[in-house]
Image (tube, coloured by chain):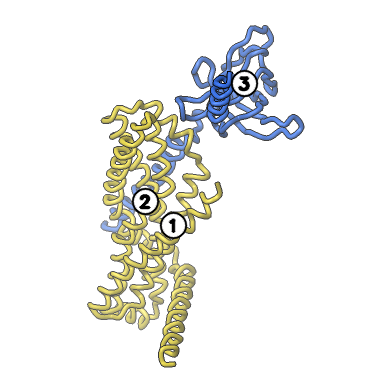
Chain colours: A blue, B yellow
Amino acid sequence: MRSKRAELLVGCFIVLGLAAFVYLAVQVSGLGFASKKDTYQVVARFDDIGGLSDRAKVTIAGVTVGSVDSITYDKNLYMAKVTMNIESDVHNIPDDSSIAILTSGLLGEKYLGISIGADDKMLKNGDEIHDTQSALVLENLISQFLFNKTSGSDK
Amino acid sequence: MKGLISLGAWLFDWLEAIGRAGIFLFQSIFRLPVRFGEAVNLLVRQLYSVGVLSLVIIIVSGTFIGMVLSLQGYSILAKFGSEDSVGQLLALSLLRELGPVVTALLFAGRAGSSLTAEIGLMKATEQLSSYEMMGVDPLRRVIAPRFIAGVVCLPLLSMVFSAAGIIGGLLVSVGWLGVSDGSFWSLMQQSVYFDTDIVNGLIKALVFAVAITWIAVYQGYECVPTSEGIGKATTRTVVLGSLAVLALDFVLTAAMFGDF
């Protein structure tokens, strides 16, 4: 009888441990099965991605509609090639839409924002967004500002 | 000259002890009880005393560490106006470091010491030699189930610890400090990766489990069979186990997260 109770408690312990593992995997790392929606891939090439990372979100009007799948260097064009997955529900993005690398807050995460164009043709799987705007690199901005300041004082 | 000789003798003793511990580890892994039912029975009893009885201390301390982490993290992050990323801080520090390490330290104190004391007392009361007299291998019947139970339990306990910590941190940061629920989870999910963070944490816990349980059962088995000897062996288990965990943690962290 004593051993039966120990077996039951050991069973509870192992189930609890595994449940904690599943909880961490699904809820904390977002590995979920529920979030695995159908997606299609879109490509964009940027001059400078400035700290954009894999799994960064892709937004339209501030709402997340997808995520960055991979970032590679396109050595023929000397540009960064960003492949992103966009949810299949959002299938009506015009072909001439533009995409920009944005920052949440002054020092926050980098993410992609799509501005909707006016074309009747919509983006399909494997299409490329041609109108891209690179990341705003703070150092460049500051050096530009200082350069303008000093050259302005000469006059 | 005399100093040199004693240094050499000490070195030989030391190497011999390591060799004995290595052989001991090898033997205790591959010598489970022969009959399957008996093996399960012995293992269940050890899983109960090593795992189930450690559960309360792990859940309570995990919850409190999660709560303290999010309080501390919030007060610093709020200075930079980025208090939303407290969830990210909480999850990464728990999964990568605090989960495995603190669980292993608590495990060394809670379960390792009791393993050493139990085996040491068995040796002092000559239970181990009476097993041998009856033709039962004490490694097979006493040591192997305890070793395997320790190796199974610590990774599970570490997962429970991390989950409890995240829930504790959620209570403090979302429930009390007013961080938004959505950004707590979304920033966390964006920065935590299953393979680099959760699996690496599990590997750490597994390595710590082998180290601590090995030290604990070896110290018990090799202790001087007097009440003083058992006391010393128990202390050594906790001290050596904790030091081994901290040193191994540095090596593992350098190997896992060292390349920037």
Chain to which the residue tagged by mark 3 belongs: A
Q: Respond whether the residues carrying marks 2 and 3 are from the same subunit.
A: no
Mark 1 residue element: helix
**Corner quadrant of residue A84:** top right
* Real-space CA distance between mark 2 and mark 3, rounded to the nearest whole angstrom: 48 Å
Residue B61 image position (x, y, % from top left): 28, 48
Give me the residue at 43% from left, 85% from top.
B7
B54 sits to left or right of A117: left
Can you say whether B63 is above or below A1 in the image? Answer: above
At 33% across and 66% down in the image, what residue appears? B239
Element type where label 2 sits in the image: helix
Q: Disc 3 residue type?
A: Gln
Q: Chain of mark 1?
A: B
> Which amino acid type is shown beneath numbered disc 2?
Leu
Q: Which mark is residue B178?
A: none
Secondary structure at numbered mark 3: strand
Q: Tell me the residue that label 3 is attached to.
A: A133
How far across and down, in percent of the image, does residue B52 sit?
31, 53
- Around disc 2, counting alpha carbons within 10 Å, would you say few (fewer than 14), some (14 to 19), or many (20 or more)? many
Location of residue B220 (image quadrant): bottom left
In the image: residue A100, left or right of residue B14: right
Who's the residue at 49% across and 18% down the image?
A63
Have a look at marks 1 and 3 and say if they share a chain: no
Residue situated in front as seen by the camera: B234 or A96: A96
Q: Label 1 belongs to which residue?
A: B249
Judged left or right of residue B125, residue B19 is right
Marks 3 and 2: in contact by CB < 8 Å?
Answer: no
- Residue tagged by mark 2? B157
**Label 1 vs label 3, nearer the camera:** 3
Image position, residue A65 (x, y; %): 54, 21
**Amino acid at pointer 1:** Asp
Q: Closer to the N terminus: mark 2 or mark 1? A: 2
